[in-house]
């Protein structure tokens, strides 16, 4: 019998200070979990990428934030301005502006920069008295769309 899902309590200040222990435990228990508000959380980045392409799902907007009690503050104000929550002509205008940054040529530049940053991080980490698995852990780069999805 698989372990029970680990509840992610979005109202917990401790969760927001350091979410990683909760997320590690949740991933050990399965590919999905739930929040205290009942939202399903995908814990595998490949699953997120798959759902991103499914027309039945969308990136959470400000109405989703309000549903979980976030109705103001810096994150709310920032989210209102992001491309994913814009619609119609404004979305098309912003997408045309940022689209070239995601072209194949730009992607190759990003990958080269990421490799250099990872190498520098690994080189500098021992001086900080800690260890890292950045780049050395075999994980593939995550796409910008790897974020939580919600049903339309």
Image (cartoon, helix red, strand yellow):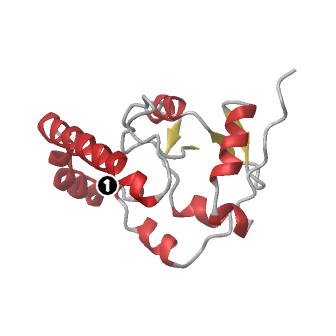
In depth, the one of 4 and 125 nearer the eye is: 125
In depth, the one of 99 and 92 nearer the eye is: 99
Q: Residue at x 75, y 57 (%)?
A: 9
Q: Which residue is drawn at 54% across and 46% down?
A: 148
Q: Residue at x 71, y 33 (%)?
A: 28
- Rendered location of residue 7, percent (x, y): 78, 48
Image quadrant containing the N terminus: top right
Q: In this view, does 92 lie to the left or right of 146?
A: left
Q: Is residue 51 left or right of residue 108?
A: right
Q: Residue at x 36, y 56 (%)?
A: 87
- Rendered location of residue 44, percent (x, y): 57, 33
Please give the count of numbered marks on the rendered protein. Answer: 1
Q: In this view, does 53 lie to the left or right of 72?
A: left
**Secondary-structure class at tag 1:** helix
In depth, the one of 136 and 26 nearer the eye is: 136
Considering every residue shown, the one lying at the far top of the view is 1
Considering every residue shown, the one lying at the far right of the view is 1
Sort mark 1 into few (<14), some (14-19) or many (20+) by Cα contacts within 10 Å.
few
Q: Image quadrant of residue 13?
A: bottom right
Considering every residue shown, the one lying at the far left of the view is 105
- Rendered location of residue 59, percent (x, y): 48, 48
Image quadrant containing the C terminus: top right
Q: Is residue 143 above or below residue 31?
A: below
Residue linked to disc 1: 88
């Amino acid at each position: 019998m698989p372990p029970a899902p680990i509840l992610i309590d979005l109202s917990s200040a401790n969760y927001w200070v350091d979410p990683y222990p909760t997320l590690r435990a949740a991933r050990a228990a399965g590919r999905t979990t739930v929040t205290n508000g009942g939202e399903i959380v995908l814990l595998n980045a490949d699953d997120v990428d798959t759902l991103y392409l499914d027309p039945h799902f969308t990136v959470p907007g400000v109405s989703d934030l309000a549903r979980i009690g976030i109705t103001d503050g810096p994150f709310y104000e920032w989210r209102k301005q992001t491309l994913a929550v814009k619609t119609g002509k404004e979305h098309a205008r912003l997408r045309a502006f940022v689209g070239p940054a995601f072209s194949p040529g730009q992607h190759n530049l990003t990958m080269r920069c990421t490799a250099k940053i990872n190498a520098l991080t690994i080189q500098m980490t021992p001086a900080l008295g800690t260890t890292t698995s950045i780049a050395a852990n075999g994980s593939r780069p995550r796409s910008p769309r790897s974020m939580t999805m919600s049903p339309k």
